[in-house]
Image: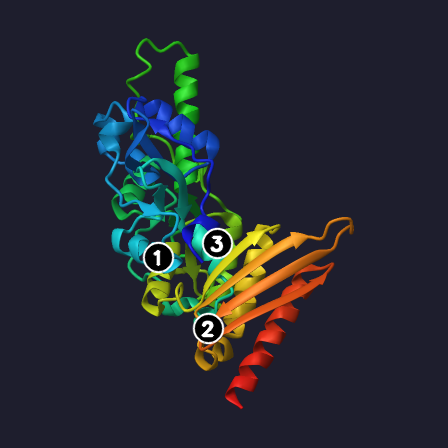
Amino acid sequence: MNVSKIMTRKVLCADANLPIDKVIELMDSKNVKELPVLQKKKYVGLLTYYDVISVDAMRAKKAIDLAKKVPVIYQRDSIDKTIQLMQSTGVGALPVVDEDKKLIGIVSDYDVLKLLINSRVFDSIKVEDLVIKRFPILRTEDTIGRAQNLAAINKIDSLPIIDNFGKLVGEVMIADIFNYMFNKRLTSTNKGKKDPDKKDYSYNEVNVMEVARKELPKIYLNLNLRKALEMMLTAKVKGTTVIDNDNRPVGILSRLKILDLLAAKNIGDSIDIEVSGDYDWDFIIMIRTLINRKESILYNAGGINKIKIHIKKIRDVTGKYQMNMTAFGKKRYNLKVDGVIKEVLFQELIDKLENGIEHLRD
């Protein structure tokens, strides 16, 4: 499967000359963590929310002042290449461009991990195998300003807050800091401040507990990595605190760290999958999951390295589909089924493919 199947095509962008305050407002209102920057309609860099809450943001005036050169990717590129680029750059989103270098989409670590969450690589991995054990912490008396600086310096999405006994009492996300920054800007403007462009971004007088999240998902060291990732994707957070049985923070689990695991496994390229026709996201997830489960026979025994699937509605028959599959390996398999439920149809195709491979082995 290539990037075109999972990328987001409607991309929120910022003009290079957009004031930093407006950048904060845009990212907060649309809940985006990465923002491509365009100059004369051409991609020139990427803004992350780590950049916008950094010390440098206090001196910057426009989006272009903070935009970083991040590698682009083409829609024909593989998922594995995407993982490798994210892992090597430490950036959780890559702009997707066409042959003329025009921005046509963006692909994020969220998109990649949602696609691969049911991969066999997660079966025997626990949170403790990937947890980041050195991490910053906050205390209940700390300020939002300290949280802001720690998050920006460490490029971490989640900051645990502990009490005097070392137990977790809350967590601050960059999204919380963002929201506070945006609301503070609105409040300052509404009060008729003479120079609204000069904002206090340190917040050294505001206690961190004002924006802390106190109802937290319980992620323990011995939790299965897939289950932990499901919780992170549901909450749409890039990182989360890991605790021990005494509710003490013992590490941070991040989506980029999980990408490191996938990069080492070369997970994206064993079997390339192309889907066309009448399908949706859930169907893509389902077929990837099933193919991963069947990989030992499909890839190892049959040499299958590419599968093409096309789905179309049968004319004049309500709710009925025809599904065609071409599998390329030690030999080429052309298979076709029709019926009502897409999931059942695909299972039938995989069963036929397995039978063909078994006959090949005989």
Q: Nearer the viewer, residue 181 or 320?
A: 320
Which quarter of the image is occupied by the N terminus? Answer: bottom left
Q: Is residue 259 left or right of residue 39?
A: right
Report which residue position mark 2 lands on: 304
First along the sequence among labels 3 and 1: 1
Amino acid type, mark 3:
Met
Q: Nearer the viewer, residue 312 or 114?
A: 312
Report which residue position mark 1 lands on: 83
First along the sequence among labels 3 and 2: 3
First along the sequence among labels 2 and 1: 1
- Residue 346 image offset from top left, x and y in percent: 63, 65
Which of label 3 and label 2 is nearer to you?
2
Report which residue position mark 3 lands on: 232
Q: Is residue 359 left or right of residue 47?
A: right
Amino acid type, mark 1:
Ile
Q: Estimate how packed mark 1 is, as few (under 14), some (14 to 19) or many (20 or more) residues with alpha carbons within 10 Å.
A: many
Residue most toward the bottom?
362
